[in-house]
Image: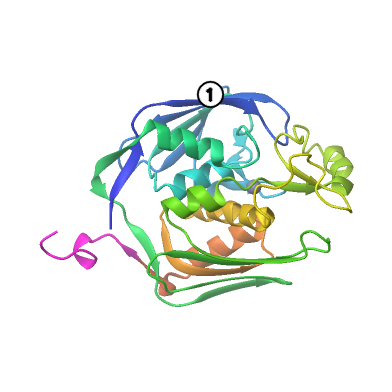
Amino acid sequence: MRLQRTIKKELEFKGIGLHTGREVSMRLNPASRDTGIVFTRTDKGVKINASVMEVSDTAFATTLGNGKGKIRTVEHVLAAASGLGIDNLHIEVDGPEIPILDGSAAGFVDALKGCGLARQASNRPYLRITKPVVFKEGQIEIAVMPYEGRRISYQIDFDHRLLGHQHLDIDIDETSFAEDIAPARTFGFVKDVEYLQSMGLAKGGSLDNAILLDDKGVVNASGLRFDDEFIRHKVLDFIGDTSLAGFPIYGHFVVSRSGHSTNVKFLKHLLSSPECWELVTDISQTLPASA
Ligand SMILES: [Zn+2]
């Protein structure tokens, strides 16, 4: 058990949205204890909680919203908050999408770490897995088992010479998240770009904010940040999407071929299986009496 945390001062980001291509400004503000993470579309005056119940779309990004307003591509900034153990934030954005920055969460992580974190006078409840939960859809499988901490074992299989089969097994803490996961960029295939743009997606996509792959390999002249950058980015997305539980989840996740849609379906399945987890809120369960 640990105390809840927010940021010490406000932070501002400017950039374009990956899918809308729109220039947006985003501000992260400290929030009081038990707020959770709350997005506000300042151009529409709409507030949206970072909750799995508010997910409205999962095509090529995770979108939160309702009939009054939507915010696209929330997963990287949410992963940054989750990975650094930040519980309470007000996130204001003046447009329909979170800035993509360089396609990774490194910019968010560097800024959040740089501004410092404030401890708040309330314990942070967490969701502890007590029995395995398994979700399957076609070839996609996500399971979570009891584990004291957060561990992710993830595998992907793509029909591409550079991606092929990749596997990553990692214990997630603030250091491993910041160093091994946050810098991994989103990726896409040249052959899909025309289709995506015809669907009104990836309008802001460029070699500055995504890894682009053709049949031969990586198109970006600067190459990759990690040999297995692709699977590291899938883990980043998984952390962002599962943070929509509203509580940190202690468990060992074993994930095969998942994406935003199945991450969200799995999370709903998990939350509707309360016989398989407990919400730990009592500090005496985890700390010695003298602490
Ligand atoms: Zn992503």
Which residue corresponds to mark 1?
42
Q: Position of residue 190 (x, y in %)?
A: 86, 45
Residue visible at 39% across and 48% down in the picture: 85
In the image, is 51 to the left or to the right of 163?
A: left
Nearer to me, 111 or 245? 111
Quadrant for the N terminus, please. bottom left
Residue 204 rendering spot, x and y as whole percentages: 75, 32
Residue shown at the point (52%, 56%) measured from the top left: 242
Residue 55: x and y in percent read: 59, 48
Residue depicted at 55% across the width and 35% down the height: 107
Classify residue 208 by image quadrant: top right
Give the total of numbered labels: 1
Amino acid type, mark 1: Thr
In the rendered image of this protein, does residue 67 appear above or below residue 183?
above
Along the line of sight, the residue nearer the viewer: 157 or 271: 157
State whether residue 246 appears in this view: no
Give, as a single range, the part of the protein colored magenta: 279-291
Q: Quadrant of residue 164?
A: bottom right
Q: Which residue is nearer to you in this view: 142 or 68?
A: 142
SS at mark 1 in the image: loop
- The answer to whether residue 18 is above or below residue 174 is above
